[in-house]
């Protein structure tokens, strides 16, 4: 991981650390202790576990590494709240995180406060050399916790969706918007472009965004916006979920085995299709982006449309060519918003992660970092697909054009949508 930590001061490191830690607690605040304990499926984690795991991350990779006098808050927490860092020790099995009824949500809060206090003391006592090492790990920890802030919202959405009373996580009005109109295609010519980040990049990035390398781009066109729920309804009406010629073989068997008939969180009623959101259940808005679809569904829809998904390299090239960057005023919101009718590339960031047709593999020359931190990305570079952009739940400042998100192709609980591409 790279960082601009060399210019950090003690006050700056502490400020950024606490701003991020306080945001996690704000996101958990609407939830009861019972809400925070439930694990609704193996892919999700309880809110309480997220709060504890990101704290364990700082305790393990910052305090235990750089403070020789640090004593673990509770020796059992390393087993309970380690995720997948094999080199850091044994772990409680992921599918059974909901069985961790103790420590309580309140005790997890005490754990978070104790680690925060210890981090403050470490920063205050550090000389210049130690401070820069602290700043680098804090930068990584901040970005790690931001990922879990996003997952916290995705996971509690799944939890609440299984409650027959359909409770809302919070209130946020849904405003109906105008139809964005037909897709406009933005064309790109053949070129060789540079993908990824140079080794002297000034700013934080994950190791999977390196190294920068040449990438051949053939002529293609990219849709100016995300696929809408209304367009997805047309795919469903044309029996898209029941036409095997549209589907990859693995995807077809997953669709049949799990009974997919619509995106996740959609259901039928006497009034038509409804969707569960973090603000409760409501009718599907045909003008908003479709979301919570798997790679297999996205790929089938693209084939039905006579198009395809973009490669991650085409997506990054399009963003760079049109100088599309994340909105610095982005605020977390509870559901993807419609595109509107303005010209140019829209919804590249801040609404829904966009599936690409690129397998998640290392860039040429990639080197896995040493130690347990090296398990952060490198060992997942198989059997997953890349998503680009960011989503409604992505924290402010976390997105960038080179960011490589990744999920297994059958998963749907994350906030993923579809942007089409086609060859020229």
Image: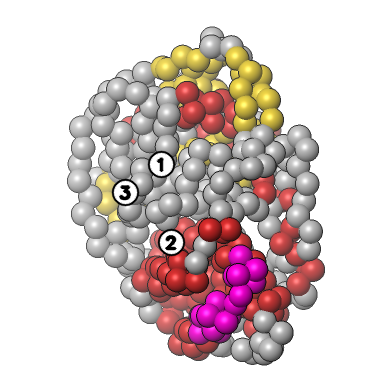
Q: Quote the CA–CA distance across marks 1 and 2.
A: 20 Å
Q: Earlier in the sequence, mark 2 or mark 3?
A: 2
Which quarter of the rendering shows the C terminus?
A: top right
| Tag 3–tag 1 contact (CB < 8 Å) | no
Q: Quote the CA–CA distance across marks 3 and 1.
A: 9 Å
* In this rendering, position of residue 265 left or right of residue 296: left
Q: Secondary structure at mark 2?
A: helix
Residue 382, how many percent across, how many down? 74, 44
Residue 89 seen in the current view: yes
Q: Residue visible at 40% across and 54% down?
A: 396
Q: Residue visible at 56% across and 88% down?
A: 102
Overall secondary structure of the magenta section:
helix
* In this rendering, position of residue 344 left or right of residue 423: left
Q: Earlier in the sequence, mark 1 or mark 2?
A: 2
| Tag 1–tag 2 contact (CB < 8 Å) | no
Residue 326 tag number: 1
Q: Which residue is mark 3?
A: 329
Segment colored magenta: 116-132
Q: Which residue is mark 2?
A: 153
Closer to us: mark 1 or mark 2?
1
Q: Residue visible at 24% across and 57% down?
A: 172
């Amino acid at each position: 991981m790279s960082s601009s930590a060399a210019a950090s001061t003690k006050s700056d490191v502490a400020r950024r650390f606490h701003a991020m830690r306080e945001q996690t607690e704000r996101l958990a605040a609407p939830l009861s202790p019972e809400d925070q304990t439930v694990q609704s499926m193996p892919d999700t984690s309880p809110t309480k576990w997220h709060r504890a795991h990101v704290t364990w991350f700082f305790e393990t990779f910052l305090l235990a590494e750089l403070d020789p006098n640090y004593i673990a808050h509770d020796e059992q927490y390393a087993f309970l709240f380690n995720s997948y860092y094999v080199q850091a020790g044994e772990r409680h099995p992921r599918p059974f995180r909901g069985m961790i009824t103790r420590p309580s949500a309140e005790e997890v809060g005490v754990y978070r406060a104790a680690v925060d206090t210890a981090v403050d003391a470490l920063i205050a006592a550090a000389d210049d050399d130690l401070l820069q090492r602290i700043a680098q790990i804090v930068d990584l920890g901040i970005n790690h916790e931001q990922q879990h802030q996003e997952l916290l919202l995705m996971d509690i959405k799944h939890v609440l969706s299984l409650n027959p009373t359909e409770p809302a996580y919070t209130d946020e009005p849904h405003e109906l918007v105008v139809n964005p109109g037909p897709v406009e295609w933005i064309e790109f010519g053949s070129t060789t472009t540079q993908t990824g980040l140079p080794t002297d990049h000034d700013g934080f990035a994950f190791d999977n965004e390196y190294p920068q390398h040449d990438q051949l781009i053939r002529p293609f066109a990219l849709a100016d916006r995300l696929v809408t729920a209304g367009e997805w309804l047309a795919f469903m009406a044309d029996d898209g979920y029941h036409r095997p010629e549209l589907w990859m073989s693995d995807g077809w068997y997953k669709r049949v085995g799990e009974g997919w008939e619509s995106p996740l969180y959609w259901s039928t009623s006497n009034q038509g299709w409804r969707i569960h959101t973090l603000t409760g259940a409501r009718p599907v808005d045909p003008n908003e982006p479709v979301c919570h679809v798997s790679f297999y569904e996205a790929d089938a829809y693209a084939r039905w449309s006579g198009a395809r998904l973009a490669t991650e390299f085409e997506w990054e090239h399009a963003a760079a060519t049109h100088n599309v960057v994340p909105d610095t005023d982005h605020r977390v919101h509870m559901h993807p918003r419609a595109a509107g009718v303005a010209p140019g590339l829209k919804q590249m960031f801040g609404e829904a992660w966009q599936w690409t047709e690129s397998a998640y593999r290392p860039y040429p020359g990639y080197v896995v970092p040493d130690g347990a931190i090296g398990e952060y990305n490198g060992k997942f570079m198989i059997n997953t697909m890349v998503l680009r952009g960011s989503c409604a739940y992505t924290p402010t400042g976390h997105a960038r054009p080179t960011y490589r998100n990744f999920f297994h192709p059958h998963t749907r609980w994350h906030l993923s949508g579809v942007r089409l591409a086609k060859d020229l």
